[in-house]
Amino acid sequence: MAAELSKRLVELFRWVDPGPGASHLVSDISGWWRDPATLAELGPALVAPFRSARPTVVVSPAVTGLLLGPLAATALGVGFVAAHKPGDGRLPAGPLTWAQSPPDFRGRRVDLAVHDRHLGTGDRVLVVDDWVATAAQVRAIYDICAARGAEALGTSAVMVDCPPATAHELRIHGLLTGADLPS
C-alpha cells in the first residue's frame, strides 16, 4: 500500500517552468489533491510512523499544511491546529504564540503563530506538512510547542528533502525524498 502511494505521488508530481526570468523550476503538487485515491491515503500514510506515540493534536503550517493537517488529524481521531503566517490572510482573534524560523531555502525567516487556546501543556504534537526542504518551519513550530508546554513528537511530510542529519535530529519522516522525484 505505501509503495503504491509513493509511486502515485511521483506520477502526479510535476516540475513547472514559471516562465521568463525564472532561475529554477517550481514544484506542482496539485495532482496530489486532485486524485481521490491519493487524497484518501495521505492522512493514514502520514500518521503511520507516529501512531504508537499517541499524538493528541496535529499542527501544520499554512498554506498547504492546511490541506494535509486535517487529513492526518482525521486519520488519528484527534484535533487540528493551524500555524498561521502573517501574510496568509486574516489571523485568528485572541492571544497567539509566535516563533520565527531560521532562514529557509530562500533565505527568508518565516513568522508562525498558533492560537494559544488550541495548544497547551500535555498536548503531544505531530507536525504535518507537504514539503520539508530546510526544516526551518518545523523548528519554528517546535519552538511554539515548547513555549506552550506541548511536546513535539516529530514531523511527517509527503516530501522530505532536508539533510538526513536534520531529519534524524527533528524526527522527520517522509513518504518521498528528493531522489524519488524526476529530474
Image (cartoon, helix red, strand yellow):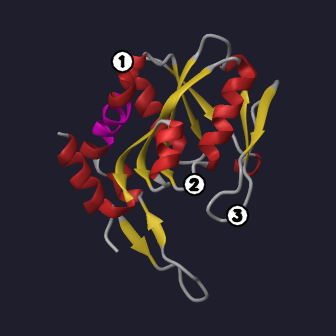
What segment is highlighted magenta in the picture? 39-47
User: Along the polypeptide, which appears first: circle 1 or circle 3?
Assistant: 1
113 displayed left or right of 170 = right
User: Residue 92's x, y, as percent?
Assistant: 75, 32
Task: State the image coordinates of residue 112 (x, y, percent, origin top left).
Answer: 72, 41
| Element marked by disc 1 | helix
First in sequence: mark 2 or mark 3? 3
Residue at 82% in and 24% down: 95
Label of residue 52 in the image: 1
Q: Which residue is drawn at the image coordinates 35% and 58% (left, top)?
A: 31
In the picture, the quarter occupied by the N terminus is top left
Question: Residue, x 34% and y 74% (percent of image)?
Answer: 183
Camera-side residue of 66 and 99? 99
Q: From the viewer's perspective, is residue 177 above or below residue 127?
A: below
Residue 9, visible in the rendered structure: yes
Residue designated by label 3:
107
Q: Label 1 amino acid?
A: Ser
Question: Taking the image as drawn, is residue 83 in sight?
Answer: no
Q: Seen from this angle, which residue lies furthest right?
A: 95
Q: Is residue 95 above or below residue 108?
A: above
Query: Would you place residue 157 above or below residue 116 in this image?
Result: below
Element under label 3?
A: loop
Q: Residues within 10 Å of mark 2 (few under 14, many from 20)?
A: some
The disc placed on residue 134 is: 2
